Amino acid sequence: MVSTTTSRPLRRVPLAGRVPLALLGLLLMAGILGPMLAPYDPTTTDSAQALLPPSSEHWFGTDQLGRDVFSRTLVATRTDLLVGAVAVSISLVIGTAIGAVAGWRGGRTDVVIGRFIDSIMAFPLFVLAVGIAAGLGNSLTSVIVATAIVNLPFYARAVRFEVSRRRNAGWVEAALLARIPPSKIVALHILPNLVGLLATQSSLNMGWAILNAAGLSFIGLGIRPPQPEWGIMVADGASYIFSGEWWVFTFPGLTLMGAVLIFTRAGDALRQLLDPRSK
């Protein structure tokens, strides 16, 4: 009886949506357990093992320093997921708060916040992220801050629209007449109805945040070597594209592409699971 009740929400998700959710679960497990499952130390170098092709001993081959590419790719999963999760969480919380204030108060507050969001959106987002990361320095924190800032407008705009659309509803006016504080109305009655929307947006932004972090690392503004990271690994392997050592950049690049695709495709399935209107 319990298993039937538990699986009932999943029945709302078509099979095409359950596959990305299953892959998302595997990806998260790889991020959590990666360092424990890696067969080799991802930072240990061995010049005698440099640039070995994929084999039963080294599934993804080795890089130019003799490091196992599979171990580095697996361990890098935690790093990239951590960067994406922290950046998206920051932008979600701050963007939702800003959007809720703008949507509820309207007027001059809405105009000021709107101009601030428009000023962020006026720049190509990756170019803006590059500028922020370059200004803050080459570190994990700078990547997270830059990614969080460029993701901010997506949540602020969505929440601002939904809150402003609902603030004049009859039940909201009744709640105000009952002396319920506006902050409680927004937090307990309006925002819960946006869970599906925010979950979908967060999943999409998670994929973009991972890609953004990898892009910053690729051009030398992200995480510093020798810490394993997909963008760094692709950059390291780029010089071997024409020399035949294809595995150095192929496997990290495919893993990065797969992670972005999984988060993108899982967004709609999460919306169907979490949207109160679909229950």
Image (cartoon, grey):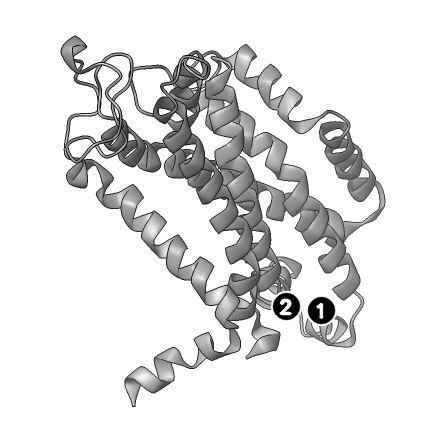
Q: Quadrant of residue 33?
A: top left
Toward the viewer: 141 or 242?
242
Residue at 62% of width from left, 38% of height from top?
152
Instruction: Check the image and report above or below for 1 versus 30.
Output: below
**What x and y, as percent, mark residue 28?**
34, 49
> Left or right: where does residue 260 sit relative to residue 245?
right
Q: Mark 1 highlights which residue? A: 176
SS at mark 1 in the image: helix
From this viewpoint, is residue 230 visible?
Answer: yes
**What x and y, as percent, mark residue 99?**
68, 47
SS at mark 2 in the image: loop
Q: Mark 2 highlights which residue? A: 180
Q: Quadrant of residue 92?
A: top right
Badge count? 2
Please tell me how crowded label 1 is: few (under 14), some (14-19), or many (20+) other residues with Cα within 10 Å.
few
Residue at 18% of width from left, 36% of height from top?
38
Q: Are marks 1 and 2 in contact (CB under 8 Å)?
A: yes
Q: Quadrant of residue 37?
A: top left
Locate the C terminus by quadrant: bottom right
Distance between the Cα atoms at labels 1 and 2?
A: 5 Å
Instruction: Check the image and report above or below for 171 versus 262.
Output: below
Amino acid on which disc 2 is placed: Ile
